[in-house]
Amino acid sequence: MQKRQFLMQMGKNQPLKAYSSCKTCGGEQQGAGYICGSDTEGNGFVIWIDDEAVFRTLEKVFQEQVPATE
C-alpha cells in the first residue's frame, strides 16, 4: 500500500493547492486528487484524497477562500 500522506522536499513557498489526480504518478490514478504545499525552506507535504465528493468540496473551499497566485 502506498503512503497517502507524506513529507518531501519541493520548491520553496509552494502555495497550498488542490490538484486532480492523474495517471502520471506511477502509471495509475492514486485517488480523486491531492493537496500539497511547502514552507520557506521547501519542506513540503502531500495528502491524497480518495473520495471524489470530498475532493470537489475541498477545491470549492480553496477557490472561495484562498487567493489565486496564478
Image (spheres, rainbow, N blue to C red):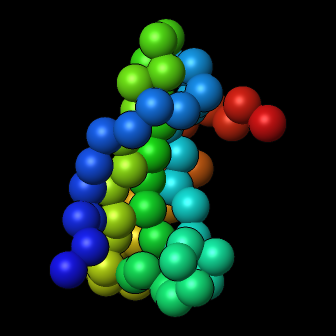
- Counting from the top left corner in percent of width and height, residue 40 is at 49, 11
Tell me, yes or no, if residue 46 can be seen here.
yes
Image vertical order of residue 22 relative to residue 64, above or below = below
- Residue furthest to the left in view is 1
- Counting from the top left corner in percent of width and height, residue 22 is at 61, 78
Image vertical order of residue 18 relative to residue 10, above or below = below
Identify the residue at horizontal 49%, vertical 21% (top origin).
Answer: 42
To which quarter of the image does residue 51 belong?
A: bottom left
Locate the N terminus and report the quarter of the image it occupies.
bottom left
Image vertical order of residue 22 relative to residue 16, above or below = below
- Counting from the top left corner in percent of width and height, residue 36 is at 45, 45
- Counting from the top left corner in percent of width and height, residue 28 is at 52, 88
Task: Count up the numbered dots.
Answer: 0
- Residue furthest to the bottom in view is 28
To which quarter of the image does residue 2 belong?
A: bottom left
- Residue furthest to the right in view is 70
In the foreground, 20 or 43: 43
Image vertical order of residue 15 relative to residue 24, above or below = above
Q: Is residue 52 left or right of residue 42?
A: left
Tell me, yes or no, if residue 61 can be seen here.
no
Locate the C terminus and report the quarter of the image it occupies.
top right
Identify the residue at horizontal 27%, vertical 49% (top origin).
Answer: 6
Identify the residue at horizontal 26%, vertical 65% (top origin).
Answer: 4
